[in-house]
Image: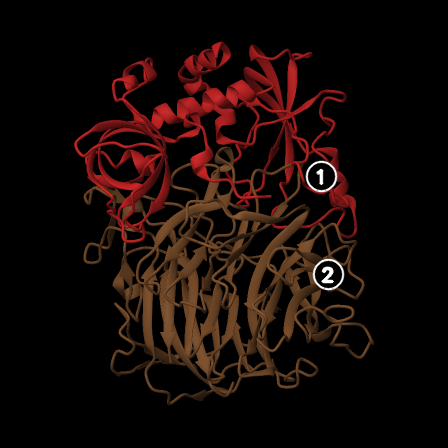
Chain colours: A red, B brown
Amino acid sequence: MAGKTKANQVPDEAKFLFKGTVRKLGASALAQVPKSEETAIVRVDEVLHAPPALAKTVGKEITVKLAKGAKPKVGDQVLFHANGWLFGKTVAVESVKQEAPALAKAMMAGRTADPTRNLKDRELENRVASADMVVEGEVSSVHLPESEMAATRAAGPARPVSEHDPKWREAVVTVKTVHKGEPTTKQVVVRFPSSTDVQWHRAPKFHAGDRGVWVLQSPKAPAAGAAAQPKGAPTLAMTATAIPGAAVYTALSPMDFHPAGQADTVASVIRAAKNS
Amino acid sequence: MPKRKPAAKNAKSGKVGRGAKGARPATGKRPQAGGRTKQKQAAAAAATVLLVNMIPQSLSGETNQDSEPTLAVNPANPLQIAASAFTPDPGGGDVAPIYVSTDGGNTWVLNSIVPSDSASGSMTADITVAFGSSSNVLYAGIIRLPVVNNTTRLNILSTQNFLSSTTMTVLVDRMGVDQPYVQAATNASGADQVFVGSNDFGSSSQTATIDQSRNGTQFSQVSIESRTTPGQDGPPVRPAIHSDGTVYAVFHGWRTFDQNSGAGTADIVVVRDDNFGNGNPPFSALQDTDNLSGVRVVQNSAFNFSDFLGQERTGGAVSIAVDPTNSSAVYVAWADLQNGVDTIHLRKSTNRGVAWSASDINTVSSATNPALAVSGQGTIGFLYQQLTGGGSAQQFETHFQYSSDGQNWTDVVLATTPANIPTKTFDPYLGDYCHLLSLGNDFYGIFSASNQPNQSNFPNGVTYQRNHDFNAQQLFDTDGTTPVAPSIDPFFFKVSP
């Protein structure tokens, strides 16, 4: 499989949207980036959406690898759709598209003044759009799935023993409000990893009494090009132990659960995603 | 086994050599005799030590747990160094970063070119890196996120330009594989020979596996376990390559395992191939007394897969290094439980892995993460992390020891950092391994530790790129004023004995 350049990403995938003034063309403010016709030093004037590390660049000069075909002049203010590239003494980013700064106003309608919040909201919109179900409710109970119970009964390794073992648990969520999808029962089963391993630590962990909004995904199919399941590794098309016959969902990203206190905050994002 | 006695402090003087910025003569500790290991005091000249906190200034606000580091130095240009750790992409993309230095490790940048997934944290679940010896190609073995269908996903990757923004090329993509550990060398014909040790759950119950390539692009799998297991081997499988075509690998050959307690026993097994993995079958050059492939350096070594050393999980660690001046000389280190204490053992073979020293040539108690390398002078280097003290005073000491004869050791204490600060956010706290390699007469290494900016934590000096105040012992964000809490950072070092 050939590598994909970030330059091939469409602007909507750009994580760093900012207005900047071109200070010097054919220049670099980071020793590791060779000066070329594609590079420019740009002062960051305003950040519209960004991850935390890039949101802090306001007022600073950074190195921009310009989008192909772009020919800004020194002194021009430009709206950059960019992604992070190198983080060293200073920052270098790769622009995937440059536009007139006036376009930012329409683009940011309804957004906040916090660029990290804006990026998180946009990512949550995408997450909701791709979710199979979004529900508000409460965890009524947490169970050990049958597959885990069987493993404890085995004398040797019942399945591959790895530091990345998810240590699955099942949360039964009693649904109060359905934002997306059509649950067939009043309760849905959410499979979650109790493991603290690096592979799973960001996944939300649930306890009886937890209330909030779940953005639920159906188990994914194997990746294209990947081999078949190895010995003993159960697929995630698993059956629920707590509610026989119920479909099992997962909530593996931090974006997939929002505690009750944040429910109002995410409501507008959910509405936006549903309308998109 | 009794614990080693506290080492005597032995401040040394010497002029700073090789001109590395921030490098200084070592303040060494001479280990004394302890346990079964009889060690004489070394009389070596002072080593030059360069130690650098690798987090760059533009990421001064980060508080990630940047654990489990590995390192690759480009033999064709030692100023080019790549490293890896459990570090997320600061840009939040569908990629994870590697650390890159182009000035011999004095300064570092992050370049996010490893395939990943932003919803899964823009990082990997395992990553190791290695350069071909003259090709300038960087290879990586990773467990790729997101998790798909409840199992781990191996990717073997390469790039010809580790500073480019182009995502690394995927050479192998396979499910059900754990802890890929890559090593590479370029043969006389200019072809990269790449070996990736892993625990492959798709290869029956004998899971210790090597993916090997004779051209740096196409790979084939070799199972290197020949004995009965309780269903699988342990995660660590480590290859070591000599330029004459000799390739060794060591693995944690599980023999018993209790699913509920995590307790088990393992053989420390060494296999060898004499022609870059072209043996028939590959890696079958060593046979033990049971007429099976692979020499057992030790049998029934005790481990517990659920064990912890402080906040650091343990459960069996191995390392191997071959002498670049003599492929018959090979060293193995492993960690086991001695009366419940995590203990590292180091042994040597002088006849191509056929026979091993009957007792340890070095033993360290309450320690983990052994890493070995042998220099161009035949000097053995030994990196490890040891838990010392108790309660709130508990520390992880990171030691680099070296010896020209395997008997007299010079101990360079790289770091004595708090073991309880910060509190871990995930496992592993420091990593299931750290890394050591040699190039010429120099040793290059990497470890993760608490970044608390206290100069007394680094007896041989340290350079921080991120904003800090050593006097106030405080980290600061990019604005230079907002305090930042301590976290786990990767540290690069170069020791020139």
Q: Secondary structure at mark 2?
A: strand
Q: Residue at x 64, y 25 (%)?
A: A218
Nearer the observer, A260 or A13: A13
Circle 2 Cα neighbour tier, 10 Å, few/some/many (<14 / 14–19 / ≥20) = some
Left or right: A118 in relation to A6: left
* Protein chain holding label 1: A
Q: Are marks 2 and 1 on the same chain?
A: no
User: Residue B418 location, x and y as percent?
Assistant: 37, 58
Q: Amino acid at mark 2?
A: Val
User: Residue B73 location, x and y as percent?
Assistant: 44, 65
- Quadrant of the snapshot with the N terminus of chain A: top right
Nearer the observer, B299 or B191: B191
Q: Please, is residue A115 above or below residue B130 in the view?
A: above
Q: Secondary structure at mark 1?
A: helix
Nearer the observer, B430 or B109: B109
- Say which quarter of the image contains residue A266: top left
Q: Amino acid at mark 1?
A: Glu
* Protein chain holding label 2: B
Q: Please, is residue B204 above or below residue B190 in the view?
A: above
Q: Please, is residue B245 above or below residue A170 in the view?
A: below
* Circle 2 or circle 1, nearest the eye: 2
- Say which quarter of the image contains residue B484: top left
Residue to which mark 2 is pinned: B222
User: Residue B168 location, x and y as percent?
Assistant: 51, 48
Residue to which mark 1 is pinned: A148
| Residue A127 appears anywhere in the view | yes
Q: Residues under labels 2 and 1: Cα distance?
A: 31 Å
